[in-house]
Amino acid sequence: MKRQGIDKDEVFNQVVVTASNEAQAAGYRAMLEAARSPLVRAELVEPDPGGRRVGSLGATVNLLKKVDMARRGLVIVVHSGGDARRTPGYAAMGKAFIPMRDGRSLLEHIVETMGRLPLPSHGGMLVVSGDVLPTFDTAKMDFSRPGVTGVAYEDCADEARRHGVYVAGGRGVVRRVDEFLQKPDVHEGRHLIDTGVMFIDWPTAAKMETLPIAGDIYDEFPKMLMKGFAPFFVNVASSCDFFHVGSTRELLVKLGDGVRYVDCVGCQLRLAGENVVTNVPAGRFKSLSLAKGECFTCIPYGRGKWLDLKYRIDDNFKADGLWEKYGLGEIMKQVDSRQLLSLRRWSGLPRRANAPARIDFAGGWSDTPPICNIEGGTVLNGAVMLNGERPIEAVVAARKDKYVKIVSRDLGRRRLVKSAAELADHADPSDWCALVKSALKVVGYKFGEDPGLDITIRADLPKGSGMGTSSILGATVLAALLGRADADELGELTLQLEQEMRTGGGWQDQFGGIVGGVKILRSQPGERQHIAVESLDTEWLASLFKARGLLYFTGQKRMARNILRKVLAFYAENPHDFAKILIKSLKADAEAAADAIRRHDADAFAAALNGYWRDKKLLDPGSTNERVEEIIGRISKHVSALTLTGAGGGGFMFILAKSRLAAAAIRSELTANAPTSQSRFYSFAFDLRGIAITQL
């Protein structure tokens, strides 16, 4: 999905993270795998050879020998081989994995920002530092020159004395470098300060493979370039901001509130001020009391060992001997990343995730594998609240024992899972616990190792409603378990969840609830589906629906997977190419409806919905039935367009009346002559937030 961030598979062919040794590399691999984000799903984590530090230039030369030349394309190298001695609260994780205010790691932010650079299509290597996030106008940069191109910005002499400085003539954005200085002794004027961003084309990278595996890419390498190793240019940004946590105090100020910073702590705290507390597992302490300026962290290492580290906010483990005093060099080689990840995964409990339902206006079935893998999918849907509420919810809280209790508020049922074998039994979709069990499998929950959990779910919708309930509930449970709501991640994991349950299904349901408002969702053919989201004019459509839109539960319940099997069988058979023609028509219906919204054309929108309803019935006659047709017959003279909101066969019906008066007539007719005791109208309104998480 490409929405607020940049999908690394569409920008970088490889994300490479360097580490100082194999122990640190193993921890980084675990952190990256746990992140499950396509932005940071690094294909290579490369330690310095021989377990000794070789510098950023040496690390770059070393990994050049490991990257496959035939598939290099665009590669980003994030140098992360430091010990993080001045931020001991995150030394076990590495600075690149410090959680930012939105819950994502610093590394994710770096890759996302660098993904916005206009890098050349013929490829090359972008080298950046894993502990610094520079922010500048990426769109104005130019990396089309051969050789090496850096990025700088103008600043005062005080800053120049602390950093690398480019000397370059000319006035354009990109300039040839005349000289490169390290921390020059200057006292006035404006200077071009190095941002640490460096792009190297592949011919130059090939020459670098012959260099010794040693040195600093921001010191020794510029000297080589100035001697003619390769052409050397610099982009000059008008301004640049940096996020860099160089000390515990900076962590307190930049990510905390200046008084306290608490992350992943499982006990009560009494803090006097200027305190940083990180990675304290639940149950290790009942409470912690820290005086002003005291900080605390726990580091898991070896086999079941923990180091409880209390330190002062201005302690400098790099210069004052504390790193050696506590033996942190050896401890960092033994960090138990599994314990650290388990601790962080279940931090912040209890928490609640809730989500809207969705109305499928056009394009459904085109999002379903293998159809979307072959044809690509296009769906128009909207996220909606029903009767003024977000109807789907999951709450996750920690237990004192190792068991998992699952409660369904709408079903009025509960179950206490007491074994790993029982938790692993999740392949029966008729089991009301299967969805939660599958979600736990997908997020990697380890029964008996991870904390026990209370999981409460709610879906205030009739069963078989056709509002995407099961998939959105799955995404909501995943969001509550993970403590984050990244749309890419949740969409992919929900597909995995449905595979675990053996229910199948497409991607539009979960994205319908994960992403708020009215949107058209598109994917290209391919095994892995990347969902592009285009948000549309929700306000105009809401105004139209306020006057003429109705949402009616038919009272007819159906199981979507039964219709799914028939549709996929028909697509596989494809008589006279008819199934493929219908899929193309379904996608065209969605595009036509989206275009009508852009043009504020109610008649064209109605025509697109009617086309979709026609095509669904042609694809599977089971999309309608006698009861549905009876309802339609009663109200048809008042209707401009209608469709069932899901696969068909029953559930909710969306109706666009010909006028406000026609809407009143439809409401009167179906209220007075309801086909079943469950049939009734629901009020609805578009939800602009999508899935949301709150800590309780």
Image: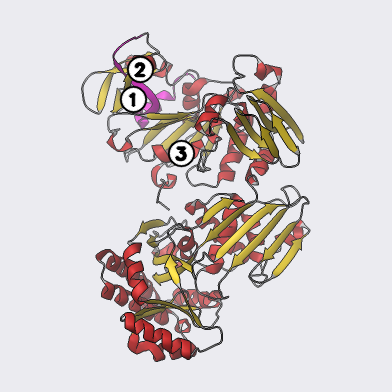
Residues tagged 3 and 1 counted as in contact (Cβ below 8 A) = no
* Residue at left offset 54%, top offset 30%: 258
Image location of residue 201, percent across then percent down: 35, 31
Mark 2: amino acid: Val
In this orientation, which residue lies closer to the viewer: 320 or 69? 320
Image location of residue 683, percent across then percent down: 46, 73
In this orientation, which residue lies closer to the viewer: 131 or 350? 350
**Residue 320 position by quadrant:** top right
Give the side of residue 198 with respect to residue 37, left or right.
Answer: left
Mark 1: amino acid: Ala
User: In this picture, which residue range is highlighted in magenta?
Assistant: 186-212
Pointer 1: what residue?
152
Residue 202 within the segment the image draws in magenta:
yes
Pointer 2: what residue?
165
Badge 3 crowding class, 10 Å Cα cut-off, few under 14, some 14 to 19, many 20 or more, is many
Name above or below for residue 477 compared with residue 619.
above
Q: Give the SS element for disc 1.
A: strand
Badge 2 crowding class, 10 Å Cα cut-off, few under 14, some 14 to 19, many 20 or more, is many
Which is more N-terminal, label 2 or label 1?
1
* Residue at left offset 61%, top offset 55%: 442
